């Protein structure tokens, strides 16, 4: 007889990139302090709600009970429940210490401080950004978090999700860049030394699925082309900071199932555009 066990494995919420950009815009406009924290071994904090068992680890078996299994009390890395249970643990604690959860994004928390300004916290799995007027309020929140979890204080925020953060506080300006990420994907897809170009697509470009059937030579050529991963990499840049890619990337993404040489040439043109504009960044605050 086969035994099956089904769990309600709801994925934990993930912060929206829009929420990160909104926080950074507020930080720039109000000249807030912006710090970053990391939770060490975050997934080990989650409390399990279901009965889950594991075999004993090699070298740690109970003598004469080698066939026994262990019931897990807390989540472990590699367990499908772990991300969800970690989020529940963190969310419960934030509400317990008086913070409010945003109704628009479950990974954004905020609270009023003594001077009637707000302190903001954005969570991405085990990484978080804190924004507030006074450094003392950040230190207080860091103390509360460190009392509950094993935290690593990363100081002033410099990078989040592959996006570099630069500030000119005298002008109340903040810049969000993906130069490092762009250089990485250019290298990955063999475009690091490609000739730069001024636009992501030609003015007369017209891509279609109605090209003539593939020749055997084209089929063999395209079998070696990493079309899906290349377009996926471009999508990430588009979603984070490179909104100027939105139209062109949406076009090339239509041909994921059966791309042709013409489609691949269009993708490479986008990389050539990025080659010449890798230092373009989003700018917040100031007069923008």
Image (spheres, rainbow, N blue to C red):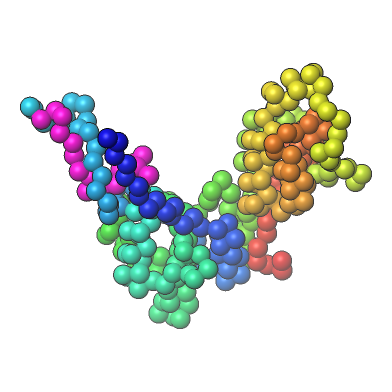
Q: Is residue 152 visible to the viewer in this orientation of the structure?
A: no
Camera-nearest residue between 45 and 158: 45
Q: Which residues are magenta?
A: 65-80
Q: Residue at x 79, y 19 (%)?
A: 216
Left-right relation of 19 to 194: left
Q: Residue at x 32, y 70 (%)?
A: 97
Q: Position of residue 129 (x, y in %)?
A: 47, 58
Residue extending furthest toward the front: 1
Left-right relation of 132 to 221: left
Q: Position of residue 150 (x, y in %)?
A: 30, 51
Quarter of the C terminus within the rendering: bottom right
Residue 136 in magenta stretch: no
Left-right relation of 56 to 152: left
Q: Residue at x 81, y 26 (%)?
A: 214
Q: Position of residue 209 (x, y in %)?
A: 81, 38
- The correct choice, above or below, for 42 with respect to 129 in the image is above
Q: What secondary structure is the stretch in magenta mostly built from? A: loop
């Amino acid at each position: 007889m086969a035994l099956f066990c089904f769990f309600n494995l709801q994925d934990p919420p993930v912060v929206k990139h829009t929420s990160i950009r909104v926080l950074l815009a507020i930080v720039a406009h109000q000249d807030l302090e912006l710090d970053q924290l990391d939770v060490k071994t975050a997934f080990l904090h989650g409390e399990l709600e279901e009965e889950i068992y594991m075999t004993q680890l090699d070298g740690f078996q109970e003598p004469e009970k080698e066939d026994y299994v262990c019931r897990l009390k807390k989540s472990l890395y590699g367990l499908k429940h772990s991300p969800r249970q970690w989020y529940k643990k963190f969310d419960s604690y934030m509400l317990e210490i008086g913070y409010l959860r945003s109704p628009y994004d479950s990974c954004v928390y905020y609270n009023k401080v003594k001077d009637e300004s707000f302190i903001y916290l954005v969570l991405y799995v085990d990484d978080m950004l804190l924004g507030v007027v006074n450094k003392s309020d950040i230190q207080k929140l860091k103390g509360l978090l460190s009392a509950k979890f094993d935290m690593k204080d990363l100081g002033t925020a410099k990078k989040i999700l592959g996006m570099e953060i630069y500030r000119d506080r005298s002008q109340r300006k903040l810049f969000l860049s993906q130069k490092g990420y762009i250089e990485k994907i250019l290298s990955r897809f063999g475009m690091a030394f490609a000739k730069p170009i001024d636009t992501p697509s030609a003015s007369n470009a017209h891509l279609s699925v109605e090209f003539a059937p593939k020749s055997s030579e084209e089929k063999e050529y395209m079998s070696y082309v990493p079309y899906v991963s290349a377009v996926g990499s471009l999508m990430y840049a588009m979603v984070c900071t490179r909104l100027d890619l939105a139209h062109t990337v949406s076009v090339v993404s239509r041909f994921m199932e059966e791309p042709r040489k013409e489609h691949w040439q269009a993708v490479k043109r986008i990389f050539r555009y990025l080659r010449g504009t890798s230092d373009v960044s989003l700018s917040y605050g100031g007069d923008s």
